[in-house]
Amino acid sequence: LAYTGIYTNWAREAVLAEVEKQMKPSRFQHVLRVEACAIRLAEKYGASLEACSLAAILHDYAKEHDAQSLKAIVLSQGMDREMIGYGSEIMHGPVGAYYAETLFGITDEAILEAIRQHTIGGETMTLIGKVLFIADYIESGRTFKGVDEARRLAEISLEEAAYFKIEKTIIHLVKKELPIYPGTIYVYNSWIQRKV
Ligand code: GDP
Ligand code: FE
Ligand code: FE
Ligand code: FE
């Protein structure tokens, strides 16, 4: 998938090379699988392939950045300070979107929002946001219990698959006795209140 240049001046290969430097090989392989899955979902649901490819390649850009570096960007950019207590798991989406904009020159708000929201989802999500949210969850290397059901739902409806991920993530966090970021609960509440 060659880029046309509408979203970034960077060529796809250059973006990949820069992303690869930020993470261990196993995570880079995850990124490539998320991209493949995102492109397939984009074809199925009529989203921009180029936008979904870029969002996918950049989504975990900041995941392995150290806590101090993530925290510095959260503070300097006026992001929600409460994220800091949850570490990289919660900060890497919003900080990744910051790099997408400042390093890669992306201004498309749907791409930036998709990266920002990819871990917890959002009260409202664009098509690109849903594609990335689900591709990250069901990419071919994922093996958690329930992934088959998530993959089945993704073929029927991105909405149903997103609802499934939002619910299962809350259950998973409670079972593991992990602290739940208020944004995660907010997203769960907004989706469940809308569900008919
Ligand atoms: P990854 O970056 O590809 O590993 O996937 P994600 O960005 O989707 O998620 C990163 C991790 O954050 C996963 O292990 C989620 O279970 C976890 N996570 C999501 N929401 C919360 C939360 O509210 N609190 C905590 N502690 N972890 C969360
Ligand atoms: Fe992530
Ligand atoms: Fe993920
Ligand atoms: Fe990921």
Image (spheres, helix red, strand yellow):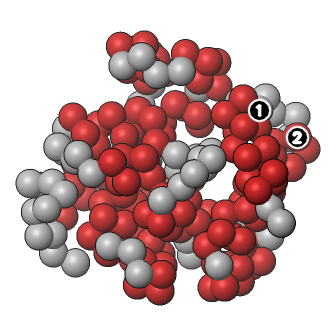
Query: Circle 1 sits in a helix, a strand or a loop, which is it?
Result: loop
Closest to the observer, 163 or 21: 163
The part of the image, by quadrant, that contains residue 40 is: bottom left
Q: Is residue 33 shown above or below 110?
A: below
Q: Residue at x 59, y 47 (%)?
A: 122
**Would you say 192 lies left or right of 138 here?**
right
**109 in relation to 26, above or below:** above
Q: Secondary structure at mark 2?
A: helix
Q: Where, by quadrant of the figure, is residue 83 drawn?
A: top right
Q: Quadrant of the C terminus?
A: bottom right
Badge number at residue 180: 1
| Disc 1 Cβ-to-ligand 1 distance below 8 Å | yes
In-front residue for pair 95/131: 131
Amino acid found under the numbered disc labelled 1: Ile
For the question of whether residue 165 can be seen, the reply is: yes
The CA distance from mark 1 to mark 2 is: 8 Å
Q: Which residue is mark 2?
A: 174
Q: In this picture, is 56 found above or below 99?
A: below
